[in-house]
Image (cartoon, rainbow, N blue to C red):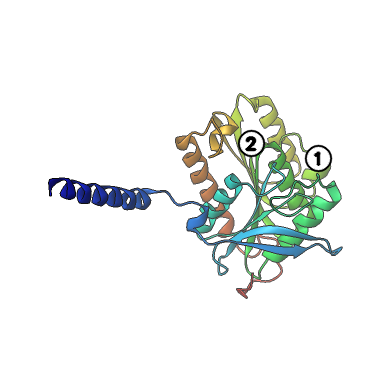
């Protein structure tokens, strides 16, 4: 009888511990319902994006990284932004579908996908922000902002963008937030980039952190929760600022929601 009661107690403890552990788990990609959908470029080339967040959102985010595909870190970033109420699209830059190896795309093919994703994200009345993570992702964000300058109201460069040529920066019309890391992004280069934007009349906000860019990557060995949270707070403040722009301040042609995309 004692052995029977001990067995029942052990089963109950294991079950209750499992339930408690599940309840304590942080929200992940699976906790917020996103969709993998197919879009097409102007030339008819189909590609994949991960879309999440409420369709009624007044702010849409084109999420870009230096990685070719849609990995778990990028999906978690998309979900985090979606949970905050933003409509988000993360673009797959692999030549093949998600999970396939695929080849690196040409600059023209990458820009075509960016423009098509922005077209789909640009519901009337919604402000669009290009958000690039890492050196390559930041460059992609600047390219997207330049390629669709009439539809992108804000650009966030996290950990890169300083080497972008003037010919690219001059084509952008958006507000820009540069999130810089030291010592990997020297003060002189940040100041030079800021001076170039000022000469071009482009509004720039700069926030510097003494940390590695890897501190923001939840899948990386150098992830730092405190730094990551500070960066997210700064990004949210910038997004709120862009969202509050008046019609004359943002490059938009339509101002009523249609709630389709």
Q: Is residue 259 above or below residue 210?
A: below
Horizontal side of 67 relative to 182 (left or right) equals: right
Horizontal side of 118 relative to 183 (left or right) equals: right
What residue sits 71% from the left and 69% below the top? 253
What residue sits 62% from the left and 75% below the top? 258
Q: Is residue 235 visible?
A: yes
What residue sits 53% from the left and 30% below the top? 222
- Mark nearest the camera among 1 and 2 is 2
What residue sits 81% from the left and 62% below the top? 41
Q: Earlier in the sequence, mark 1 or mark 2?
A: 2
Q: How many labels does the image show?
A: 2
Horizontal side of 52 relative to 198 (left or right) equals: left
Image quadrant for the C terminus?
bottom right
Q: Where is residue 144 in the image (x, y as percent from the top left)?
A: 75, 52
Estimate how packed mark 2 is, as few (under 14), some (14 to 19) or many (20 or more) residues with alpha carbons within 10 Å: many
Estimate how packed mark 1 is, as few (under 14), some (14 to 19) or many (20 or more) residues with alpha carbons within 10 Å: few
Q: Mark 1 and 2 residues: CB-CB less than 8 Å, in contact?
A: no
Q: What residue is shown with label 2?
A: 159
Describe the element under mark 2 as helix, strand or loop: loop
Q: Can residue 201 be seen in this view?
A: no
Q: Where is residue 202 in the image (x, y as percent from the top left)?
A: 70, 46
Q: Distance between the residues labelled 1 and 2?
A: 18 Å
- Residue nearest the observer in this picture, 150 or 13: 13
- Residue nearest the observer in this picture, 95 or 176: 95
Labelled disc at residue 166: 1
Q: Position of residue 152 (x, y in %)?
A: 69, 57
Q: Position of residue 242 (x, y in %)?
A: 59, 55
- Residue nearest the observer in this picture, 75 or 242: 75
Describe the element under mark 1 as helix, strand or loop: helix
């Amino acid at each position: 009888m004692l052995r029977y009661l001990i067995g029942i107690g052990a089963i109950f403890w294991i079950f209750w511990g499992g339930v408690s552990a599940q309840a304590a788990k942080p929200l992940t990609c699976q906790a917020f319902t996103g969709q993998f959908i197919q879009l097409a470029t102007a030339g008819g080339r189909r590609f994949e994006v991960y879309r999440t967040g409420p369709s009624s959102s007044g702010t849409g985010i084109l999420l870009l990284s230096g990685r070719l595909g849609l990995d778990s870190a990028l999906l978690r970033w998309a979900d985090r932004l979606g949970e905050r109420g933003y409509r988000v699209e993360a673009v797959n830059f692999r030549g093949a579908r998600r999970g396939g190896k695929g080849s690196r795309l040409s600059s023209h093919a990458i820009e075509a996908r960016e423009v098509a994703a922005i077209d789909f994200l640009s519901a009337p009345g919604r402000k669009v922000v290009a958000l690039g993570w890492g050196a390559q992702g930041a460059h992609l964000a600047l390219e997207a902002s330049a390629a669709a300058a009439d539809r992108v109201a804000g650009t966030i460069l996290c950990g890169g963008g300083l080497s972008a040529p003037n010919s690219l920066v001059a084509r952008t019309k958006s507000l820009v937030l540069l999130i810089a890391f030291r010592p990997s992004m020297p003060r002189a280069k940040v100041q030079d980039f800021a001076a170039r934007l000022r000469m071009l009349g482009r509004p720039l906000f700069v926030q510097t952190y003494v940390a590695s860019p890897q501190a923001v990557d939840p899948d990386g060995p150098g992830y730092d929760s405190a730094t990551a949270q500070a960066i997210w707070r700064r990004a949210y403040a910038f997004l709120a600022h862009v969202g509050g722009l008046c019609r004359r301040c943002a490059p938009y042609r339509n101002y009523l929601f249609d709630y389709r995309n």
